[in-house]
Image (cartoon, coloured by chain):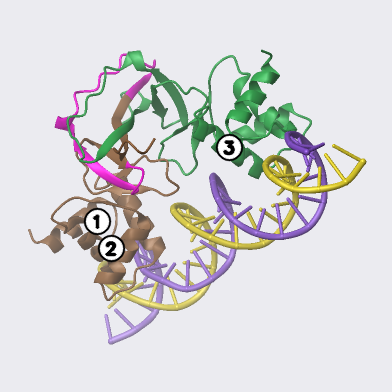
Chain colours: A brown, B green, C yellow, D purple
Amino acid sequence: MSYAEQYIEKLRKSGLRPTKQRVKICEVLFDAEKTFHFTIKELVKIIENQANIKVSLATVYNTVHAFIKRGYLKEIPLNASQSYYDTNVTHHHHFFDEEDNKLIDIDQDDVDEINIRKKIPGKKIRSVEVIAKIVSDNQSQK
Amino acid sequence: MSYAEQYIEKLRKSGLRPTKQRVKICEVLFDAEKTFHFTIKELVKIIENQANIKVSLATVYNTVHAFIKRGYLKEIPLNASQSYYDTNVTHHHHFFDEEDNKLIDIDQDDVDEINIRKKIPGKKIRSVEVIAKIVSDNQSQK
DNA sequence: AATTATATTAAAATAGTTCTAAACTGTTGA
DNA sequence: TCAACAGTTTAGAACTATTTTAATATAATT
């Protein structure tokens, strides 16, 4: 199956028709050799730089949300004012570099299994995420 | 030391003068028998309901930020559009109930120590937080 | 009490996100 | 072929949380 066909399938499975704009968004998100993290602003910038087509903010938000709902993208909980997204949808964790505002993946294998002994009646755990905040390690800083 | 004195001390240690408004904010935050979670909007509502004095949003934001900087409050990373804060500043983790948009504390003792084997050169870990998202546990739901 | 430094406030500004309504596109079926 | 329709795109407006501004008020210091 060609890349283009894969994108169309992803879009259809997310309940979206494959339009020019949406396929372009797929190219940016799923063509990359490596998974990556992005904000909506960054995604729009990449599209603008790469493509000769114009994609509005509304379309980008719609498409990204549909992919999250379908599980093709992951939203990352961060206390920043904007949302971060991850094209790596496998189970994994994150470093957040507070100085550079950068996210770094931590493989599931690099963290021991997290066993939470507290239970909430009538509720089940849907996901467990670890966020480790990191800062420069030099003595002069606090 | 009276409560009022404790608040004044907390404010001074946070680099703030003890004004009527700020002391009122302290009363709401630090008087409670139990620690609790809040958003700025909720905090403002509590103050309005309890107090005969008016406190502007700007003052609330300033004071909350100063307390976070000083370590009297904790900001909680959530993928919501608004920030959540916690008056429990001990090391602990959270359940986030996605249906009720409610945070629930998990004591440090209820989670095995988290050992991250991946290292980032030149960086050190400042904090490690676990967020476990929970949903209703009935078979009819996906 | 006067001075000065800081605080409070309403309102404006900003930024991310969502909504809206009009124009557009592609498909279907007569 | 082309009219009708369902779904799309878009610019811009609306909305929400947060921050900034600048005028007024208050607290601390002398």
The answer to which of A20 and B6 lies nearer the viewer is B6
Q: Secondary structure at mark 2?
A: helix
Query: Residue A111 in magenta?
Result: yes
Residue under disc 2 on the same chain as residue under disc 3: no
In the picture shown, does residue B9 fall above or below D14?
Answer: above
Residue at 28% over, 63% down: A22
What type is the residue that disc 3 sits on? Ile
Residue A73 rendering spot, x and y as whole percentages: 27, 47
Image side of residue A84 versus residue B105, left or right: left
User: Which marked residue is nearer to the observer: mark 1 or mark 2?
Assistant: 2
In the picture, the quarter occupied by the C terminus of chain A is top left
Query: Residue A9 in magenta?
Result: no
Q: Residues within 10 Å of mark 1 (few under 14, many from 20)?
A: many
Q: Residues within 10 Å of mark 3 (few under 14, many from 20)?
A: some
State which chain disc 2 sits on. Answer: A
Q: CA distance from mark 3 to mark 1?
A: 38 Å
Residues shaded magenta: A97-124
Residue beneath disc 2: A22
Rendering quarter of residue A133 = top left
Whether pointer 1 and pointer 2 mark residues with C-beta atoms closer than 8 Å, the reply is yes
Residue A34 rendering spot, x and y as whole percentages: 15, 52
Q: Secondary structure at mark 3?
A: helix
The answer to which of B14 and B109 lies nearer the viewer is B14
In the picture shown, does residue A129 fall above or below D24?
Answer: above
Residue beneath disc 3: B40
Residue beneath disc 1: A11
